[in-house]
Amino acid sequence: MNRTFAWLVLLPFFLLCSGQASATAVVSLSQEEQALVQRHVPVKIGVVSGNEPYSFYRDGKINGFSIDILHAIEARTGLQFDIRVGNWTEVYNSFKDGRLDAIDAISMTEPRKAFTLYTNPYHLRETVLFESAVNPLADYRGFDTLKGKKKIGVIKDIYYKSWLQNRKDIEIIEYGNYVDLMKSLAFGWLDGVVTSELTGEYLARENNLPNLRVAGPLGIAGLEKEDYRIGVNKSQAVLHSIISKGLDAIPPQERAQIEARWRKYRGGSPKATKKLKLTHAEETFVRQHPVFKVGLMPDYEPFSFVSKGEVKGFSVALLDRIADSTGMRFEPVVDNWATLLDAFRDGKIDVIGNISYTEKRKAYALFSRDYYRIPNVIFVRNDFGAYAGLASLRGKRVGTTRDIFYKEPLSALLGGTLMEFDSQEEMMKALSFGRVDAVATALNTGNNHVKKLGLVNVEIAGELTLKAFRYTQVPCA
């Protein structure tokens, strides 16, 4: 990129780690234990796939909190784990039949003691109820305090499903994967979701689902916490001893750091903010340009919005951080999107925030890498009827904000002209009051306006699934 102020948005916030723990201590092994390690026979251990953030595939390899724990044990004992991945039923049955030496993330039960030697728990997974901040659960103080008919989502075949079905006014809805489970809550199709706190928080961040939060613990005896242990085949007492020693040798501080990596940083590590070392030409450029005008929308919560006469939001905080690192100064120019885009094209402002990349815009913009991705969705009134994808919108009045980046492909698909609006608030009111039949917009923005304006007859019909336009990419240009 040629513009200095454009590439600065690439400032990295986190340094990704390899996931392998370094040995900070070596455990003391007996002669029998040393002999087993020195045979260098990999330990076949079963690990559950799709169990974010504990164990899952990314970039062609298995990752996660539990995998980091296994690597830490390897580093301290000299063992090598041969990770065998499958769903819980496959992994558990293979372990029970003796085809695996060990199994990860198993909870202790009396029946399992017949064939399992357990380590101490390396994690206590807290089971909680998630809610949407847009439609919060009233006066929630535990599962038994839920009022009225509620739709509660759980993962398919989860062991505590039968515990939750005791309430006749609760409808339990099962999902095949955690992503669909959390999306359904964000889209308003569920009133709550039961899952582990770490899993829910991770998936909400990973899939950019704003406004999801923990309502509180379930408050059901026996379901407060789920213990994660490593189980070893009962015939392999020496192996159990080695793994237990390696696990117990991981200091509490290191375990907390591993958990924090997956709770806060998606498997990466925090990186301290520091002054960037600019080239002589860049330093000269900054000195010669005392202020850069940056265009920001007043109603694009939580990225940029006006509160008590001051522009705030995630994008503003990001610009402040860039300014601290470079010595640059940014002057916000607040207006609706169409006006800002025209001013940017005409060179009247230097930077524009929250812009999505398109080939057409490359003629006048240099883009940073996207720093956030927001699901785009279709909002409708609650009397719309059955929604079966974008085909349901053909012949309907569909609203978008003026000059939205997916305007042309959406208009072509629907076979008509979209109704464009200068402000998000005006557009969402038009939907509620019947001037349009549907609205295409970003999930966070639509939800915030539904809540702020009290639009009780507006709901999410589904995701906007235009090819290559599933998400609103949020870079600066």
Image: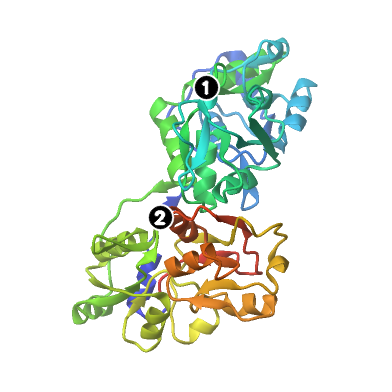
- In this view, the residue in front, 311 or 14, is 311
Residue 48 point in image, percent of width and height = 67, 35
Residue 34 point in image, percent of width and height = 59, 20
Where is 125 relative to 326, above or below? above
Q: Visible in this render: residue 246?
A: no
> Mark 1: few, some, or many residues within 10 Å (few <14, many ≥20)?
some
Residue type, label 1: Glu
Q: Is residue 127 left or right of residue 290?
A: right
- In this view, the residue in front, 143 or 203, is 143
Q: Quadrant of the N terminus?
A: bottom left
Q: Residue at x 61, y 81 (%)?
A: 417
**Rendered image: mark on residue 472:** none
Q: Visible in this render: residue 451?
A: yes
Question: Which residue is tagged 1?
Answer: 224
Helix, strand or loop under label 2: helix
Mark nearer the N terminus (1 vs 2) = 1
Q: Residue at x 49, y 64 (%)?
A: 428
Residue type, label 2: Lys
Where is 6 relative to 238, above or below? below
Residue 155, located in which quarter of the rendered image? Answer: top right
Question: Which residue is tagged 2?
Answer: 452
> Mark 2: few, some, or many residues within 10 Å (few <14, many ≥20)?
few
Where is 321 relative to 55, above or below? below
Helix, strand or loop under label 1: loop
